[in-house]
Amino acid sequence: MRRMFTGATVIALLLGAAAPAAAAAPASDAHATTDPVSWSARHLGRQALPERDGWAAEGTGTTGGATASPERTRVVRSRAELVAALGGDNASNATDATPKIIYVDGAVDGFEGPDDTPLSCADLADPAYTLDAYLAAYDPAVWGRVTPAGPLEEARVRSVANQTRQTQINVGPNTTIIGLRGARLTGLTLMIDRAPNVIVRNLTFVDARDCFPAWSPTDGEAGNWNSQYDQISVRRSEHVWVDHNTFTDGDNPDSAQPTHFGRPYQVHDGSLDVTHTASLVTASWNRFTGRDKLMLIGSSNTVGPDVGRLKVTLHHNLFDGVLQRLPRVRFGQVDVYNNLYRLDGDGFQYALGVGVQSALYVQNNFFALDATVDPADLLYDWGGTALTERGTWVRQGSAPARPVDLLAAYNATHDPDLGADAGWTPTLRRDPVLPTALVPLLVGPLAGADRLPI
């Protein structure tokens, strides 16, 4: 029987909240927070991922902190308060499995010191490290095309360790972190490592900058600067739902960075990376804007523990003015449907990276392209062999939108060809797939933070 789109179905898609909450919000919840929060915020804080909503709904599903006690339901306004709400000690919070709900109010900055005073990169640098000294020591004209080593590189590594302790915020299992209206997490990484059952919603992530990028002279033909910190990093974890968030570099884009050793000095890494055997992740209704590297699924080409893992669903996300990894996939069965891509030619590299043993299923996505972006370049072969792709529409420049067979366009201009069958068919989809023509009408205005009724 054919499934029809009703008004209720469309509204549920817009809000990303079709299923009832896992548990009703107790009337006493607000008393456990620093300030009361609205009924709608309490409801969303206790909401579980709806049934069948992507890979994170498999098996036991994803409930986050839905069963949190009043004592573990907090409103936070600073880094120190966020660390306290996550368990109290950033070094050990990753193992705190007590259910918890954390509402973020206002801006929380990873560069806040213990007394909430702002820290700079210089405050986190090892005494033996300066960028000027690093550039002088490892200039390829002096050092050669050899990986940096010695006391100055060791000082950089110690500086990275200082920053990691400060700006990497460790999240434990059974946690929901949800932003109140206007909430921002700035200059920090949410690290979800060995922490199953986590929900992150309605937050704007800004400028997770690396103060101490590494020079990698053998990365590519000319070398590259590589940074360490993602905005959200999911590692060795299952059942993670990332929904209605915005990811941006704010007023510190990589495009504004200087050039060193003839290569851009890049201070940002990914927006949402899923690596190190993580699996069962759903990312829905997020907005990624003005960034370079977006989403890496699988961090190594080595055949090993990642095989059979890295199962991720991406639906109703907006990729706006971004450059690459939308996503780049190794090994995983990754379902990419009903996403909107608005891409221009200024630095754009590719959208979908088909990596080693990847199994991308790409359906009913809409690409609004600058006239200079060729649809044949939306795919990139990183050592993969096939993907399933159907229902794609493209609007290029001012031309009308039209259906385009991306795989055929790619194969017509690239060798070797990619096959047309990823070897699987998604079954975990909450609602019928939207007709592609509707995707820009709904995803454009409704993806990202501050779109939920909170």
Image (spheres, grey):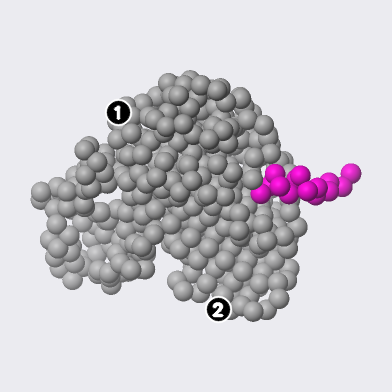
Q: Nearer the viewer, residue 330 or 274?
A: 274
Percent coordinates x, y for residue 126 in the rendering: 14, 47
- Three-letter code for the amino acid on which mark 1 is drawn: Asp
- What's the residue at 52%, 72% (across, down)? 344
Q: Which residues are magenta?
A: 1-14
Q: How many marks?
A: 2
> How far across and how far down the image is residue 341, in percent?
59, 63
Task: Please state which of the two labelled residues, at mark 1 or mark 2, is closer to the viewer.
Answer: 1
Q: Give the structural element (helix, strand or loop) at label 1.
A: loop
For residue 402, above or below residue 171: below
Quadrant in the picture for the N terminus: top right
Query: Does 273 lie within the magenta span?
Result: no
Residue 19 vertical position relative to residue 107 in the rendered view, above or below: above
Circle 1 residue: 89
Task: Locate residue 72, reporting x and y percent.
Answer: 43, 24
Q: Nearer the viewer, residue 128 or 300?
A: 128
The local crowd at label 1, few if under 14, some if 14 to 19, many if 20 or more residues have their Cα within 10 Å, is some
Q: Is residue 147 left or right of residue 431?
A: left
